[in-house]
Image (spheres, helix red, strand yellow):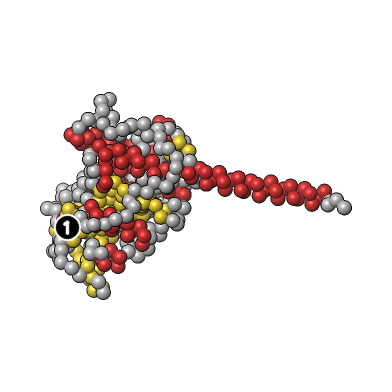
Amino acid sequence: MKPPKSKIFALIIVSVFLTSILSGGVWFLVRQKYPKIIKSLPDPFILNNGTRVSTAQDWEIRRIEIKELLQSSEYGTIPGRPDRVVANEIQSEVLENGTKKTVVLSITPFNSTPSVTFNMMIWVYTPNIPGPLPVVVKVSPDSTGSQEMASDIILNRGYMYVCYNHTELDPDTKGHDIEGAAQSAYPSYSWGSLGVWAWGGSRVVDYLVGESWVEAPDGIPEADPTKLIITGHSRRGKTALLAGAMDERFAMVVPNGSGCGGTGSFLVQGSACETIQVITSPKNYKSWFKEDFNRFGRNEMNLTFDQHFLCALVAPRVLITTNALQDYWANPSGTQTIYKATDIVYEFLGVKERNGIHYRKGKHAFKEEDFGVLLDFADLHLLGKNITGDFCKTPYPYESPIEFAAP
């Protein structure tokens, strides 16, 4: 007895549906291993006058040009240091393995207008050992923004841990923009939120190293000014990378899951990753970037840079990017190409070992494993300890579209 036509039709529909799902899943996984390539990555060694970098001195000139390019195109212009910073300790707490102090930084951009002042709160965790100490500076308070609590891990490894409230400088918004305190105080600059938040990281450094424009009646922490690290996760990872690229006082830079606008490539796109069009949509995070950066949305062919330009600004200092294999939104496969392209700059400067990349299993988060990699790499390169580990993971088999080599 033949089954009714209605059942046959239903079986056909189910079969087509399942086939579609399976083929879509297979394509998704293939696209991760072999991402979409829009074009080859631009050569970071080409100077604005058309000649190519050939010496370390040439590279210093090129670094200045790259900073100007990224500010004029992607992040907006960022001001220099303020005229005055006053640090006031408002709370102190004794921990099992150290102390935690809450400090307010009052920032006055111009002494000529002393009434224009705004605040940023920071939290200083110090282990019970004598200084000067290496420092991990983190964008945002501890255990916020998909980040596991890290204070105990960091203190137990002998590092100071300083977190800062970046959103006091400029609110973290989606679908709209609010002019924050820093943007209001510097109206002639075109910086978006990422630029503002990165600038805040530099103000933390002002305090930690006791710059001449800082007043700290309660004293300066015993930080080692040669061993300052900045890190952050997701949008805060983008911020950390930008801060570390622009401020050479950071000896080490560790963006975690930073994606589009961080270490994710604009020109090499894995499955379901965030793109310029998506991130700069007025419904999403246009305010993070320079106002007109969205002109490159679905127009990446016209980009004269990719994020290896930003990463290269960290060289020859220490850089490691930490990522998760299932963090598809952050473009982990495209990040591999940015690492490889940046590696060529480190090779040119003779410090290839200072550029690292790490992938763990899992999704979008800042986990204990990520902090462990950060501290191991810091122990190795900043403290000179005998540390072993795989700090150059490249799990994706595709060939990166890199046509330039070290001069």
Q: Quadrant of residue 164?
A: bottom left
Decide if residue 244 is in sight here.
Answer: no
Quarter of the rendering containing residue 396: top left
Quadrant including the C terminus: top left
The residue that appears at 40% across and 35% down in the rendered structure is: 401
Residue 136 position in % (x across, y down): 26, 58
**Amino acid at the residue labelled 1:** Asp
Say above or below: 25 vs 127: above
Pinpoint residue 301: horizontal percent, then vertical percent.
Answer: 42, 31
Q: Position of residue 281 (x, y in %)?
A: 45, 43
Q: Quadrant of residue 58?
A: top left
Judged from this view, the residue extending furthest toward the right is 1
At a point 25% along the width and 60% down the height, the residue shown is 162
Q: Residue at x 40, y 32 (%)?
A: 40
Crowd rating for badge 1 (residues with CA inside 10 Å; few <14, some 14–19, many 20+):
some
Number of marks in the rendered image: 1
Q: Nearer the viewer, residue 332 or 73?
A: 332
User: Which structural element holds mark 1?
Assistant: strand
Q: Which residue is mark 1?
A: 224
Is residue 359 visible in the rendered image? The answer is: yes
Query: Relative to the observer, which residue lies in front, 395 or 146?
Result: 395
Relative height, residue 118 to residue 297 (above, below): below
Q: Give the residue drawn at x 48%, y 41%.
A: 34
